[in-house]
Image (spheres, helix red, strand yellow):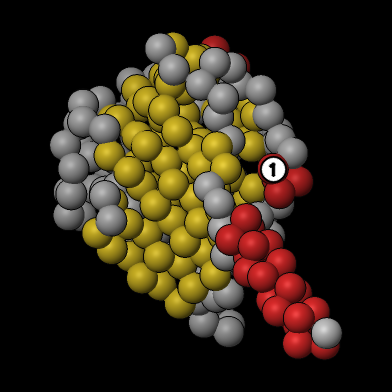
Amino acid sequence: MKHLLIAILAVITLQANAQGKKWVELFDGKSLAGWKINESPASFRVENGSIIIEGPRGHLFYDGTVGDHNFKDFEVQATVMTFPGSNSGLYVCTDFLEVGFPSVGYEVQVNNSHTDWRRTASLYNIVDTSERFVKDEEWFDLNVTVKGNHIVTKINGVTVVDYTQPANPLRSKGQELRLIKGGTIALQAHDPKSKVAYKSIKVRSL
């Protein structure tokens, strides 16, 4: 009887772990339900099943019920298309703020041809790459894994950044809060000349 109980508990644990690792979509494909804009609401719209970001600076923060919009030890994957000369960003471990560029957490760059040399999947201003892995006007998957003090970014499954945050990271002025912590996810509208589309943003716990 004892062995049977142990076996049952093991199965339940395995099932719970498997459920915890399922992908959960944060964008319903129809609206911005579960998301919160801090400024420039006109910069964000839903069109043909995608979030279109185009217009003045603003940020769209996930504010929904999944994970109580507070993710720690997780993976996020966005399916993205950039347009010529555009710039955006996918923030992780961040907090909502009313105005300005988020100073909390990390920005994963989304930029394949903007004048800023830091290209897609850079850990902005922490670990940057000038290499371009994908072209404008093509869909690609941008993946970010955050576990413990470790962040990995990938494009279409290819690792771009593999970063371990040191115990006492040195940060330049204004970058002091670029740290791993529990937080939400945000999408960036960078400037009026930039247009980027996101047709999926999904997460899973690790």
User: Residue at position x 17%, y 54% from top?
Assistant: 131
Residue 35, x across and y down, in percent: 65, 29
Quadrant into which the N terminus falls: bottom right
Q: Which residue is mark 1?
A: 66
In the image, residue 78 sits, relative to residue 191, either above or below, namely below
What is the quadrant of residue 5 in the picture? bottom right
User: Residue at position x 52%, y 64% from top?
Assistant: 146
- Which sits in the foreground, 131 or 177? 131
In the image, residue 75 sits, relative to residue 164, either above or below, namely above
Query: How many numbered marks have been drawn onto this rendered protein structure?
Result: 1
Residue 96, x across and y down, in percent: 69, 41
Residue 106, x across and y down, in percent: 51, 56
Q: Residue furthest right?
A: 1
Quadrant into which the C terminus falls: bottom right
Q: Residue furthest front?
A: 1
In the picture, measured across the screen, residue 84 lies left or right of residue 76, that is left
- Which sits in the foreground, 18 or 187? 18
In the picture, measured across the screen, residue 42 lies left or right of residue 37, that is left
